Image (cartoon, coloured by chain):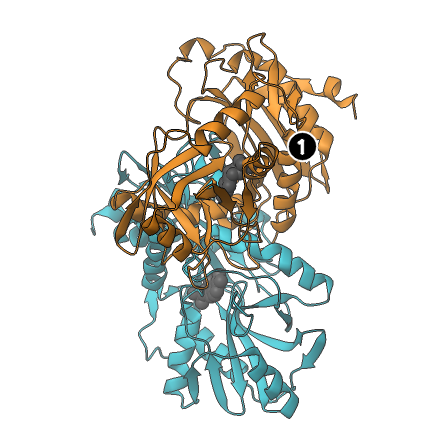
Chain colours: A orange, B cyan
Amino acid sequence: MNTLMSDIKITRTKTTKIHDVDFDNLNFGRTFSDHMLVCDYKDGKWQSPEIVPYQPIVLDPSAKIFHYGQSVFEGMKAYKDANDSVWLFRPLENFKRLNISSKRLAIPELPEDIFMEGLKALLKVDSNWIPKKEGSSLYIRPFIFASGNGFHASPADQYKFVIALAPSGAYFSGKVKVLIEETYSRSANGGVGFAKAGGNYAGQFYPTQLAVEKGYQQVIWTDDTNHEYIEEAGAMNIFIRINDTLITGPTSDRILDGITRKSIIDIAKREGIPVEVRKITVSEVVNAAKDGSLKEMFGAGTAAVVSPISGFGYKGIDYDLPELKDTYATFIKKYITDIQTNKSDDPFGWRVKM
Amino acid sequence: MNTLMSDIKITRTKTTKIHDVDFDNLNFGRTFSDHMLVCDYKDGKWQSPEIVPYQPIVLDPSAKIFHYGQSVFEGMKAYKDANDSVWLFRPLENFKRLNISSKRLAIPELPEDIFMEGLKALLKVDSNWIPKKEGSSLYIRPFIFASGNGFHASPADQYKFVIALAPSGAYFSGKVKVLIEETYSRSANGGVGFAKAGGNYAGQFYPTQLAVEKGYQQVIWTDDTNHEYIEEAGAMNIFIRINDTLITGPTSDRILDGITRKSIIDIAKREGIPVEVRKITVSEVVNAAKDGSLKEMFGAGTAAVVSPISGFGYKGIDYDLPELKDTYATFIKKYITDIQTNKSDDPFGWRVKM
Ligand SMILES: Cc1ncc(COP(=O)(O)O)c(C=O)c1O
Ligand SMILES: Cc1ncc(COP(=O)(O)O)c(C=O)c1O
């Protein structure tokens, strides 16, 4: 396993793009580094990964990714500290979740060494692409898609695993206003909602557009049976603070088991913040907003980190959240970011040096 | 609009692949014709379609199709009659459904002339690829996918519409044994199940693999709330004959509004077959199997045409269907195929000459 890293074939680009990049004004996920990792699955097994210059992917028009949405992905971040050391946050969790997603999508599971050693080698090659500026990071996008061919609704016989890197700024700018969904749904019981499957995201675009037209930035999904329970947002799990208690819904086969979410639960426990993992009904939130016990709502995810919510809409009524001085969101965001960027101790052992 | 067809730029292949194809032994969707239609959406509009040699598609690794499953497709067939005339079956219905799917997936709707005139022009260029053998046809795959770039879960700003052609034999060989699903689901209330969205198919692969391991070929999906109602199969709507009545479930936002399904309903009405469109519970089907009133089950879809089901499994028990002499399935399959291939009158005006 440890021999693999030295085995990875590396083809370096002849012309770096790095001098075109304004690292002080990075958007999110639109600038890509010089190299990428690629690894093909064929003849019944994952082949040797390679690092190559960032380059187009060439596929037959009948490649199953175009037709049947057979794809999964992950999202991670690499940070550089004051001493230029490079840090990842709980990368093994992303690896495990990738395989959980793959299994549900009938994609062959990836060996751990290809993921971990491949990622390490790629970060080494492109280490100068990792931003140091506060609030910026190198967004890491591992993904697998069906590259095998044929107009037949059945799993492909070939897949491609790729890791691409995007130096990125903040995902959201400012606070987010959300709409609690009453009509559309993100996922079914017994469906693929818990997987980071491509199709879960495309299905959210149209309802989110409708919400954006009404002046909201994001949708809070509810269960598809009665739209009674708060589930999650497009790319974030949701936390709700009622009085001094922080509440988040339990994960299920409809909800992504977010790494930020579970880290926040652990941080809250350690820091003496009362935290409950239990179902939350929409009416509980609405009532808490009405009686003033609703203090905060925030989203939590790798891309958005901790993203405070300024208010929510439900059944045509807008509810504003109070502007508190000392919020859990601010405390937790700093706490987790300090761990991620090696600015504080890491009592949980989450940070991994590359 | 009618000037468009003559406007379509056609680049012909220098080397046809047609002589390599054994038209007497075609599989389904694995052999592709010499040309394809491509049309790009960018700068806020669909550009001019072109016919080019069948060739690979080249995409940036950050193209949203790889990450967010933003894609829709259609499935149609072209038939050649004894006089070498070429026929399509209700093509406008496929065009309309493509746009219904696109809307739900936040993909810009396609103008009718690009679809219809593009298809006509392509079929003309590749008309010698349309099989004449009974049971064979030219399978037509129009599809649209997000070709715009970026690791941001939001609709792409560029799309590609492609029509590819695959001379094909039968989708299933022989009767199909199905498993009525009790655990997994295909779609959510308020979800994208009614759309021909790529992600709907990948989500079915794993549960179908589990069914195949148990000796079934296909899964019959049930509602995701209680798995109480019969919905549809992977690529077919489902008909059930109890005594002399043909029953199929109503379409909904969870079920694809199949063109074969609605054609069969019309045929049954015209031919005096009692037909009901209503919800069917799994227990009704099980009870009918037990008391002998369950006479037939079959799937209906463009690819599979009319596909008789030999039996089903439910809660660990297998139920065989009787072997009747004169089945609705046989009657309807011949009836619809004769219309499609110009072997009979077309009282409904469904057939369209190319
Ligand atoms: C649907 C969904 N929920 C939640 C999250 C947050 O998960 P994590 O904290 O692991 O990034 C993400 C993003 O990764 C997501 O896509
Ligand atoms: C999920 C699903 N249901 C039903 C059908 C049948 O629809 P149609 O008869 O229009 O081909 C298809 C195939 O097109 C399908 O993919």
Q: Is residue A213 left or right of residue A268?
A: left
x%, y% of residue B127?
A: 42, 54
User: In x, y percent, where is residue A293?
Assistant: 39, 46
Q: Quadrant of residue B79?
A: bottom left
Image mark count? 1
Which residue is at 66% across, 18% downward?
A353
Give the camera-side residue of B294 and B120. B294
Quadrant showing the C terminus of chain A: top right
Residue shown at 46% from the left, 73% from the top = B337
User: Within 10 Å of the Cα at label 1, are there few (<14), some (14-19), or many (20+) other Cα atoms?
Assistant: some
Residue B64 quadrant: top left
Image location (x, y in percent) of residue B227: 56, 70
Q: Position of residue A136 (x, y in %)?
A: 46, 19
Q: Is residue A141 above or below residue B139?
A: above
A178 relative position to B307: left or right = left
Q: Amino acid at mark 1?
A: Leu
The residue located at (44%, 89%) in the rendering is B273
Q: Which quarter of the image is occupied by the N terminus of chain A?
A: top right
The residue closer to the viewer here, B105 or B244, is: B105
Asked if ligand 1 lies within 8 A of label 1, the reply is: no
Left or right of A258, for residue B150: left
B222, above or below A103, in the image: below
The answer to whether residue A318 is visible is yes
Q: Secondary structure at mark 1?
A: helix
User: For mark 1, what is the residue?
Assistant: A92
Q: Is the residue A215 above or below the residue B302 in the image?
A: above
Image-based side of A86 in relation to A67, left or right: right
